[in-house]
Image (cartoon, rainbow, N blue to C red):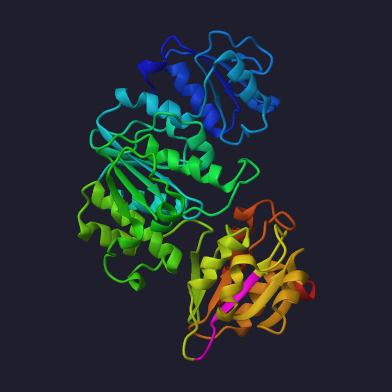
Amino acid sequence: MITSSAFRGKRYAVLGLARSGLATVDALLASGAQVVAWDRQENARALVEGRAEMGDPLEIDLSGFDAIVVSPGVPLNTHPIAGRAAQLGVPVIGDIELFAQARADLPPHSVVGITGTNGKSTTTALVHHILQTAGVPSAMGGNIGLPIMGQEPLPEGGAYVLELSSYQIDLTQSLDCDVAVLLNISPDHLDRYESFDAYAASKARLFEMQSADNFAVVESAAEDELDVLGNAKTDVFILIDDVEPIGAQTDWPSLQGPHNLQNAQAAIAVARCLGVADVKIGEALGSFKGLPHRMERAGTHNGVLFINDSKATNTDSTAPALAAFQPEANGPRIHWIVGGLPKEDGLGACEPHVGNVAVAYTIGEAGPRFAELLDGRVQVERAEMLCEAVSRAIANARPGDVVLFSPACASFDQFKDYEQRGERFRQFVDALTSDTQGDDPCGRGGAA
């Protein structure tokens, strides 16, 4: 774990004992801090009982505390902890701010901070992969992977690559990124912010915390329309749109589509800022495997490509997947499996890309509505269940086609979460394309 003399002898309250909260408690205790911890769940409290003092920061006396460390999931705009802390003058911070304060005790290193409405996870993982390919010690954390305070410190010359949500930036005051990246901004999380401008301002704070000689990598539209560099100290900025790619995008199997071109351009810019040679960057772009359940290649069968995009839980997330596979000479080639628990009504951002779809297979609670919206525009097959949709898509698809599972909906009507849903898709593809297929995996005809 990461420890620091900056915490020794200080007193902290930790609210929320999920993964990052537990890592925070461990790191603070190991650093010689006093910790009062709390979680609504008794089983979570049991994980630190006997090591940290127990106490709800909404009820205990917070006088003399150095900070309250909260989970990014705590809504500061509505949760009473924000007002109580403000009355007592106690800072409310997150684990990323603790990492920022611990940096002085770490071997010399770089920090990359990556934010944006879409593409954060892929870009963070890609930068990490490029650095690993180039032999640069790196760790990936923040909103992805293991909690940053729970990871081992990197040796000298290493790079910490952090995916940062707006919530995490809100809880951070001193993270001076050597390279800060803003991929894009579109309306999101407006239940936590009073306006879109306030949400954009939260993202822009990543640049405001930088020193003058560090790098800012930013989407041109975000800068032109929202002036996200308006309060930045650095004059060293790179427009993502102007970054020259390395090789052809067709050579990057897991980075297809215009959204992934932007992600790759941002990652290339970051790697160059950190001194990685283009030859190593190009090698890494070609070998990158992508993230599970996000435009993940689930295999090929008889010339048909299967894509698991289960993480696409709304139309904004699905639209780039539909845009990634353009029609060829013989027409549209996407067999789109869509539906689940709806988050919105209508096709939303998917509307401009419906022409890329050969057949739509509708499933779940939202299935009938998607069938209604798409009927007459593309061939529609009402499948209801995921396995049946996969089976029909396999029967209809021809060499060169793509079976795209990008549901544009939440998973909770039929699955525990998007991860379980994506795993089931993979399993159904494997079973239904296997040369040794036994019982019908969809359970038709009495099969289990």
Q: Residue 216 at x, y = what percent?
A: 33, 46
Q: Is residue 432 visible?
A: no
From which residue to which does the magenta span run? 330-337
Q: Residue at x 48, y 81 (%)?
A: 303
Report which quarter residue 398 is drawn in. bottom right
In percent of the image, x 36 and y 73: which residue is there? 250
Q: On the picture, is 161 further left or further right than 34? A: left
Whether residue 266 is visible here, answered yes or no, is yes
Q: Which of the pair 171/378 is nearer the observer?
A: 171
* Of the pair 170 and 99, the residue shown nearer to us: 170
Residue drawn at point x = 69 percent, y = 51 percent: 416
Of 194 and 425, which appears nearest the observer? 194
Residue 180: x %, y % from top left = 36, 44
* Residue 162 x %, y %: 41, 41
Q: Is 336 within the magenta?
A: yes
Q: Position of residue 317 (x, y in %)?
A: 56, 61
In the picture, which quadrant includes the N terminus? top left
Q: Is residue 44 left or right of residue 282?
A: right
